[in-house]
Image (tube, rainbow, N blue to C red):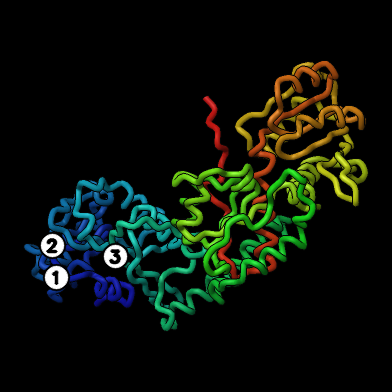
Amino acid sequence: MLDERLKTIEQMVSGRGVAVDVGTDHAHLAAQLVKSGRCQRVIASDIKEGPLESARRTVEAAGISDKVELILSDGLENVPLEGVTDIVIAGMGGETIAEIIGALPADRYDQENVRWILQPMTKPEHLRKTLYRYQLSITEEKAVEVGDKIYVVMCAEYDPEFRYLTEFEALYGFFDDTDETAQKYREREAERLNRVAESLKKAGKNEEAQHYFALSYKMKNGVEEIAIQELYDFLDSLYPFALQEKWDNSGLLVENTTMTCCRVLLSLDISLQAVSEAEGKGSDLIISHHPVIFEPRRRISRHDPVYRLIYSDIAALCMHTNVDIAPGGTNGVILKKLSERFELDGDPMPFEELGGGNNLGWIVTLKEKILPEKLAEAVRDIFGCEYVRLARSCMRCVSRIAFCSGSGGSMLELAIDKGCDALITGDVKHDVWIDANNSHIALIDCGHFHTENPVLWELRRVIEEKFPQLDVEIAELSIDPCRYV
């Protein structure tokens, strides 16, 4: 007799021909598939001889040895797949199942005519996300309760259309909304995510904690759309668009048809890669730091991200210098990171004062002086840089540090005038390095990308705190545009 978990798996097998049971153990499923007439033949594989011997006894006792082929194999490595219609992988971790599927060359089986029936014991969200990267769409998913455990069983088939799952979609799954067991499963997941959030909050990791609180909320309530104007007004209250520099072009630069959003992608830049990711994840809106429209355009080619945004009906909201200037924005994030790494002496001071109580960048004083090399190593770790550049001539210890995100090399003279012995920024030009060496100031270039990209996590935090019903993703392709060789 099969338990409810294996019965559900059996019911998902197509019944069109030959099935493979990977990690068959005692071959109970394989035997039932044959005896019920659901499959003409079953190939049962396992990585160890012991389970295969148990399987052999099962099929012999059932009198179906001629219809069940037993194979010793690591995953699908030694399994003949010609004519196979269904592949079952059950009772393993989600990551292991994903590895088995990923290790299978596409030319070894009929991709378009094979159904995958999968039952992960752990990490179903990892498996779901990976399936879509392999162009396998989940066509059916069920939750099965056995004792005090709830198992997930999913069916996936080849889909020629690329589609990527967001983190939330991978957690939420593809159950029938009327499935009471699935609802119970989601409630348990919501509780688990909430516990993770509470632990992160206690550890002082507020950005991550808020993200898990929002995921927990959506597991219970699902995703809801809101008006883009409502999101714009909220962000304007935190990072007023009126603060932007005169030469800047921040704001809602591209509209979509409905002017609503439920899936939002955050990216430092709106590149073609970022738009492609937004398309794959079904995003309605991209929020970026750098404006996608900056200089006037005389033409828009099909290779222009603006063209792709309009074609795909994706809105673009860009927040540039207003986020650099506003408290809690780009430079506020750097201030927080430095405060977590070093003990500061006194309150931070404005770096470049813009009037009206606004400023660009900050000046901090360390309680203990530090060698320039040690400071450079610390900020490299803070920003996750592959390398940083450091002025050659400054050898003395430093404590008074100015910083400005992005491209702040032109502020070197201001840093010197304000008595700073170090300046942290990005995009430093050659002549500025000469001036820094002449002045013996510890100039550190962490790169434009690395000094600004961390603000995306803060943007996600504030958006999810206000709108937990939105599915907010930080772009996986918001990465350093340069390679270092």
Residue 352 vs 369, above or below: the answer is below
Query: Residue 368, percent across and down?
Result: 87, 33
Judged from the image, the secondary structure of the residue bearing numbered disc 3 is strand
Q: CA distance from mark 3 to mark 2?
A: 18 Å
Residue at x-position 85% and y-position 27%? 413
The answer to whether residue 383 is above or below residue 110 is above
Q: Circle 1 — which element?
A: helix
Q: Residue at x 65, y 48 (%)?
A: 289
- Which residue is depicted at the point 12% across and 64% down? 41
Q: Are marks 2 and 1 in contact (CB under 8 Å)?
A: yes
Q: Is residue 139 left or right of residue 29?
A: right
Query: Where is residue 343 shown, x and y percent of the image?
Result: 85, 41
Q: CA distance from mark 1 to mark 3?
A: 17 Å
Which residue, given by chain and number where applicable, does mark 1 sit on? 34
User: Which image quarter holds the N terminus?
Assistant: bottom left
Q: Which residue corresponds to mark 3?
A: 117
Q: Are marks 3 and 2 in contact (CB under 8 Å)?
A: no
Disc 3 residue crowd, few under 14, some 14–19, many 20+, Cα 10 Å: many
Residue 348: quadrant of the picture? top right
Of tags 1 and 3, the one toward the viewer is 3
Report the residue that reaches farthest toward the left.
66
Taking the view exactly as shown, the residue that stands out farthest to the front is 298
Can the viewer see residue 264 in this picture?
no
Q: Horizontally, is 4 left or right of 284 in the view? A: left
Dot 2, how many residues are within 10 Å of its Cα: few (below 14), some (14-19), or many (20+)?
A: many
Q: Residue at x 38, y 63 (%)?
A: 120
Kindly identify the amino acid type of the residue bearing the numbered disc 1.
Val
Q: Which mark is residue 68?
A: 2
Residue 93: assigned label? none
